[in-house]
Image (spheres, helix red, strand yellow):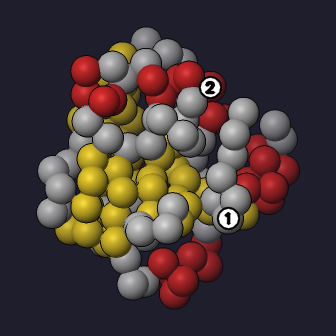
Amino acid sequence: MFVPEGILCTKNHEYLYEDGNGYKIGLTEYGLEQLGDVVFVELPEAGSEFVKGEVFGTIESVRAASELCMPASGTVVEVNEKLIENPEIINENPYEDGWFIKITSDTVEEESGDLMEYVDYCDDFDF
């Protein structure tokens, strides 16, 4: 599975990575394994502003529903609209096609102290 370089992860399984003109946010494959097959996502509108730790959406699977929390403060500049009609895309490829939102942020570096590099995240959750 493709995993972007420089990806950072939260202990709640959200990820954040810079894609050249913003930061994409989604859920790691390990987080998705814990949820099971995704059947619904609720995402914010472009232009919405959030602070780190704030809930920005909801994801529902065949097993459970979970809140999605911001790994960094920022303004939503793009929403992955494909997920609204086809949430199963998340299960197939959470990093390339299954990201939730893209944000702009000036605070990622200063707020990233509790975020883990992908290799450390994998070690932490033993997968």
Question: Taking the image as drawn, is residue 73 in sight?
Answer: no
Using the image as rendered, state which of residue 47 and residue 121 is in the foreground: 47
> Residue 34: horizontal and vertical position, in percent?
60, 27
Q: Which of the image's four quarters has the C terminus?
A: top right
Percent from the top left, x then y, of residue 24?
A: 45, 56
What number is the disc on residue 33?
A: 2
Query: What residue is rendered at 45% in x and 53% in y?
Result: 25
* Residue corresponding to mark 1: 6
The amino acid at mark 2 is: Glu
The spot of residue 71 in percent (x, y) is 46, 63
Q: CA distance from mark 1 to mark 2?
A: 22 Å
Structural crowding at the residue carrying mark 1, measured as other residues with C-alpha within 10 Å and reported as few (<14), some (14–19) or many (≥20): few
**Which residue shows up at 17% across the image and 62% down it?**
48
Q: Earlier in the sequence, mark 1 or mark 2?
A: 1
The residue at the point 67 percent across, 65 percent down is: 6
Percent position of residue 38, x then y: 43, 20
Q: In which quadrant of the rendered view does residue 2 lie? A: top right
| Mark whose residue sits in front, 1 or 2 | 1
